Image (spheres, rainbow, N blue to C red):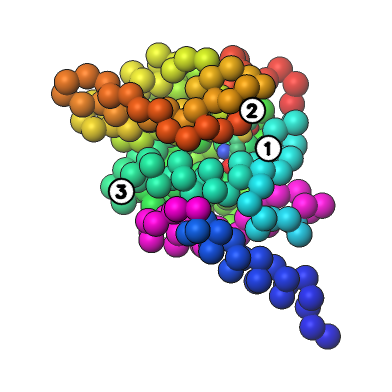
Amino acid sequence: MANLSADGQDEGRMEFLLTLKRRGIGDQAVLRAMDEVPRERFVEAAFADSAYADQALPISCGQTISQPYVVAYMTEQLGVRSHHRVLEVGTGSGYQAAVLSRLAREVVSIERYRTLADQARQRLASLGFANVTVIAGDGFAGVPDKAPFDRIIVTAAADEVPPALLDQLADDDGVMLIPLGPQGAVQHIVKLTKTPAGVRRESLIPVRFVPLLAGQAQEL
Ligand code: SAH
């Protein structure tokens, strides 16, 4: 008997890459990385049929896995090279970390919910994404003992750039992406680049992310 759901998923995956290209993602390495990570393994079973639709989906702890276009866009803007060490703040499902792991030497990802951190760590290990380390902790503090990072990506929205993260960004051409702006209103992805002349700041596309909250979650 034909496996209808798998066929549907293959079509969905082809459409998925076409949508990313149509929306302007042009970096072949990023498209390849998006193609290599099975998003259906990062969403709840109930949403597996929507895994390749271009939309954010709910995950545990009231959080969300980001929309594929936003993942691809931020990955492209981050300009990850194969020798880079990358810090992600906001592991969530681990999906963005998996995409980054295809492009970087090493990915360190920090998540304030221990439940999400544990699930993501297990999921990434079982799928063979061996160059990702998931840490349960407060991303406002970064991961000082593994700094500096060539690239930093924050996948939750803040009012301002956490100073510790800027300190942990490499001085030599370090790039950080972070959604900034008030909750419940339009935020913008802001790109910070460390140059010898100081930190260059550019505002990119409007987005809507869950908030970056201070402290490690007390609940699971
Ligand atoms: N990148 C994720 C989606 C992230 S949603 C993915 O690919 O699935 C944002 C995540 O940031 C949530 O899981 C939330 O719990 C986490 N978060 C919010 N504030 C944080 C903080 N201070 N430190 C670490 N993680 C935080």
Along the polypeptide, which appears first: circle 2 or circle 3? 3
Along the polypeptide, which appears first: circle 1 or circle 3? 1
The reply to whether dot 1 and dot 3 touch (C-beta < 8 Å) is no
Which residue is disc 3 drawn over?
A: 81
Badge 3 local density, few (<14 within 10 Å), some, or many (20+)? some
Q: Is the residue indicated by label 1 positioned so its CB lies within 8 Å of ligand 1?
A: yes
Q: Residue at 46% x, 45% y: name it.
A: 73
Question: Which quarter of the figure has residue 66?
Answer: top right
Residue 177: x %, y % from top left: 42, 31
- The answer to whether residue 128 is left or right of residue 150 is right
Query: SS at mark 1?
Result: strand
Tell which of 25 and 220 is nearer to you.
Answer: 25
Question: Which quarter of the figure has residue 144?
Answer: top left
Disc number for residue 64: 1
Q: Disc 1 marks which amino acid?
A: Thr
- The answer to whether residue 71 is left or right of residue 113 is left
Q: Is the residue indicated by label 2 positioned so its CB lies within 8 Å of ligand 1?
A: yes
